[in-house]
Image (tube, rainbow, N blue to C red):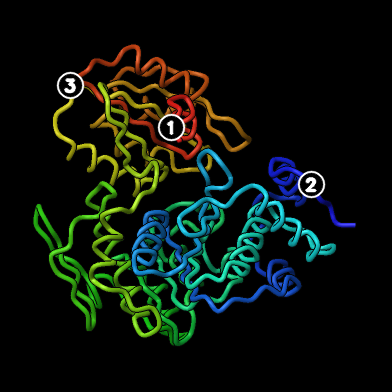
Amino acid sequence: MPAVFATLDAWLAYIESQHSRPIDLGLERVVKVRDALGAVTSARVITVGGTNGKGSTCAMLEAILRAAGYRVGVYSSPHLLRYNERVRVEGMEVGDEALCTAFAAVEAARGDTSLTYFEYGTLAAWWLFCQQGLDVIVLEVGLGGRLDAVNAIEPDCSIVTGVALDHMDYLGDTREKIGFEKSGIFRAEKPAVCGDPNPPQSLLEHARAIGAQLWVQGRDFGYSGDKTQWNYRGRAQNRHSLAYPALRGANQLLNAATVLAALESLQACLPVSMQAVREGLMHVEIPARFQILPGKPPVVLDVAHNPQAAGVLAENLLSMGFYRETWAVCGMLSDKDIAGTLRHLLPRIDHWLLCDLQGPRAATASMLKDVLRGAGCQAEIVCLDSPAGALQVARERAGEGDRIVAFGSFLTVAGVMQALAVK
């Protein structure tokens, strides 16, 4: 008899314990259970991969397509506070009961096939979306692309936001190796949109080899703008006098242009008006991507956890204007490029409040301290046992003219959000 549980927490505890490894890349098991589920839909599928910017890209796609009148489902990961954040239908998180029903469907279909936590979640989201009568399904890749569970679902358009060094234990230690893994979500004769202006040769070659319809930022599409508005230039479609996306940070124009290229590539089946683009970009929301919580001092939330994302965070902090001192609440996972990530923030941080995180992959605060001192950091460093504890020290000591920035991991930002009761 397949297992059945009454609560979402019970399901999550169960699926987390069912496979021998938390990450086990490969499609054979997922495809087998996908076929057994038998879930089908006429919805258009957009798959979004890349090292950074996936969440923002998915959020912009969702906002614009919903403004255009389409029924949209989005699957993303990881979550910050609730598992339900991972599965959205019509802009709303799916409730516990629906998720429990979806997990039960996967459990009944899998037989003796073992699935990881992420594979269960991906198949459950897919089954649930197929019940909803959606027009568009947006799927965010979890790790890599070629062997990620999301790649078991056939896309109508694939997006790689960019390629940088992260998850090197699984994907390889060069951009060329990682680019090949990311490009595994491309499909023959289907639009393949690359938001990286300098893509690895491996990505270009794979797209060419399979006959994908490749769009590259800076070659097939791009953007320009001034301080008040920006313009999108595509292959056959230009969109002028656009307001900047509601998401903060100059890097969001890269993501926005990539989104508009993907929508241009699908215009024959998913037409989108200028008004829908404007409305979607104006109202798009996603937490913890350079999210500034007002107050004195303000708190900046950013899930930057690799060198490229940390470099963008450093630029965005510089653009915020003058603050007397910056207090960092930082915790990281040990399998990240800690030195490469922290190096970008050294010139921006006056006080480092380093925190331990929970879980087997967590780096300790003392490990982070050693990395900072090894990099020549002269700023104050304090080690604490949790993100909430680090935030408390920051709020006690920071002045009204200062700012607090929490970054380094989804776990760090989630801990700060919980402490601040941010929903």
Q: Which mark is residue 422?
A: 1
Q: Out of 201 and 147, give the one closest to the viewer.
A: 147
Rendered view: 85 above or below 51: above
Q: Secondary structure at mark 2?
A: loop
Callout 3 amino acid: Arg
Rendered view: 395 above or below 47: above
In terms of image quadrants, where is residue 64? bottom left
Callout 2 amino acid: Phe
Q: Nearer the viewer, mark 3 or mark 2?
A: 2
Residue 104 picture location, percent across and down:
76, 57
Q: Nearer the viewer, mark 3 or mark 1?
A: 1
Which residue is pictured at 59% across the width and 38% down the height? 361
In terms of image quadrants, where is residue 228? bottom left
> Within 10 angstroms of label 2, few (less than 14), some, or many (20 or more) residues?
some
Residue wearing tag 3: 324
Return the disc, 1 or 2, that comes first in the chain's sequence. 2
Q: Out of 271 and 18, give the one closest to the viewer.
A: 271
> Within 10 angstroms of label 1, few (less than 14), some, or many (20 or more) residues?
few
Return the disc, 3 or 1, that comes first in the chain's sequence. 3
Q: Secondary structure at mark 1?
A: loop
Rendered view: 4 above or below 147: above
Q: Which mark is residue 5?
A: 2
Distance, label 1 to label 2, CA atoms, is 29 Å
Residues under numbered marks 1 and 2 in contact, where contact means CB atoms less than 8 Å apart? no
Callout 1 amino acid: Val
Q: Out of 101 and 31, give the one closest to the viewer.
A: 101
Which residue is pictured at 43% across the width and 25% down the height? 420
Which residue is pictured at 23% across the width and 62% down the height? 278
